[in-house]
Image (spheres, rainbow, N blue to C red):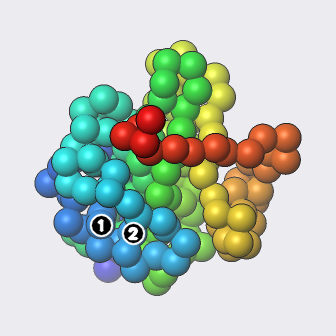
Amino acid sequence: MIAAPPLISEMTLADYDEVLALWRATENVGLSDADSRSGVQAYLERNAGLSLVTRYDGRLVGAVLCGHDGRRGYLHHLAVAADFRNRGIGRTLVNECLARLAALGIQKCHAWVYHENAVGQAFWERVGWAPRTDLKVMSKHAEDR
């Protein structure tokens, strides 16, 4: 019997527990308070239809948060279960996110990768993304005014 291909669908809050478990099991996915159930719910509502999950025989094996600010797209927490890597799942999720962003008129997208994440950087370069060496991300908590 031939196995069905993995199915991609829109991430919903009902996926949260499985997605969080995948993120926690994936090296170099940095989680914070923003990744709480309410934080992810707000992100999904603000960026409706953009974040995706992949299931194989009912098991969640891939996930990515995708959103935009009206001019640039952003991908966060791309993760594929270790036993499902190197099957094109990550590439397919990324390409579907880009197609959905393009349909909204978003022409450029950025992904966040830790400096020490050589495997992640190699993936992004393999799927055609280029590292930016001219920018450095600066962050501050909004409540620390």
Quarter of the picture holding the N terminus: bottom left
Q: Which residue is mark 1?
A: 20
Query: 2 or 143, which lies in front?
Result: 143
In the image, residue 140 lies at what x, y percent?
51, 44
Counting every numbered tag in the picture gives 2
Q: Quadrant of residue 109?
A: top right
Q: Quadrant of residue 60?
A: bottom left
Residue lying at 47% horizontally and 58% vertically, measured from the top left: 77
Mark 1 Cα shell of 10 Å, populated few (<14), some (14-19), many (≥20): some
In the image, residue 50 lies at what x, y percent?
38, 36
Residue lying at 43% horizontally and 42% vertically, measured from the top left: 144
User: Is 26 rendered above or below residue 17?
Assistant: below
Asked whether, in this view, residue 122 is left or right of residue 25, the answer is right
- Callout 1, which amino acid? Leu
- Res 130 visible: no
- Res 67 visible: yes
Query: 40 or 99, which lies in front?
Result: 40
- Callout 2, which amino acid? Trp
